[in-house]
Image (cartoon, rainbow, N blue to C red):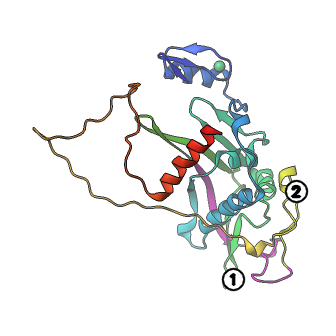
Amino acid sequence: MKNENKYNCLLCQQIFPSRNKLLIHERNKHRNNKIIPHRISLFLPSFELVYQYQDAFIILIKKKLGFSRHSIGSKKLSICAFPETVFVHLFENEPTFRYSSVKQMHSCYFQGKMGEERLKQILNYEYWSSKQNPNTKTTGYVLFVNNEETYTVKFNWSLLELNENKRNFQCGTVTCTFTTDSREFINENIPPEPKKNSKKDYRPILPRTPLQQLSLLELNENKRNFQCGTVTCTFTTDSREFINENIPPEPKKNSKKDYRPILPRTPLQQLYINHISINKNS
Ligand SMILES: [Zn+2]
């Protein structure tokens, strides 16, 4: 995007002298943009990958539901390392889907009763928005409409990009914000939650987008599962002035002579290098 201090709008190719001007332009001219300029580079996600993140939303939203006064109000959850292609496949056909190419951010929201119903289809689960206490029959739920107003569930995907010399790390994070409420439903038609571990329970079949249509056959709803690996790295840091000591200098930014320092490698890395050189030769 940045080229000799010029900022290019990827949607209409106009050029701006600063990122700020480009942001203002995007806000004025492309406020409702749905075009993703790099759409073609997003691989088609496997169904397994889509299920995994549908289930992640369901499980993490339900974890925010509760039965006491403390579990009522605005809630926010985030999922780190969320593949952009999954977000785009789940939401790009929705009327409220938007993409900001300057902020590298996708967003989509769902409002009122229609929003609740649509999310049943997108998440492929009828009971994604409520949880009942089996003892008191109190139900915690995602609030979409009450006597006073309608409420919104918002999904955002944004890119975190970090650079160290020519090394680059990109990671997408999803946040989901919504409002919760809790009460006893008496003499109202609340669909019962399926019993756990009953062999007869299946995922309720709902009208689906074509992608989801293909996915129905195998799963039954009690098998929803979200697994996510997290790496932690712990270390100790220090800071001081080095005077008259041989500290290797950091490479200058954007110098063409900079290259990755070659270090002794583990067998895994060695193999990778061999593989690259084999491919180059063939
Ligand atoms: Zn533009």
**Residue at the (88%, 60%) spot, across then down:** 206
The numbered mark, 1 or 2, whose residue comes first in the sequence reads: 1
Q: Type of residue at label 1?
A: Pro
Q: Is residue 183 magenta?
A: yes
Q: Residue at x 70, y 63 (%)?
A: 55
Circle 1 sits on which residue?
134
Q: Position of residue 237 (x, y in %)?
A: 25, 53
Residue in the foreground of this view, choosing between 122 and 133: 122
Measured Cα–Cα span from mark 1 to mark 2 = 32 Å
Whether residue 123 is visible here, answered yes or no, is yes
Ligand 1 within 8 Å of the CB at mark 1: no
214 sits to left or right of 159: right
Q: Is residue 206 above or below residue 35?
A: below
Return the mark for residue 213: 2
Tell me which segment is drawn in magenta.
Answer: 173-200
Front label number (1 vs 2): 2
Of helix, strand and loop, which one carries label 1? Answer: loop
Closer to the camera, 258 or 50? 258
Quarter of the image where ligand 1 sits = top right
Tag 1 near tag 2, CB within 8 Å: no
Crowdedness of circle 2 by 10 Å Cα count: few (<14), some, many (20+)? some
Look at the picture and state if 269 lies above or below 138. Answer: above
Mark 1 Cα shell of 10 Å, populated few (<14), some (14-19), many (≥20): few
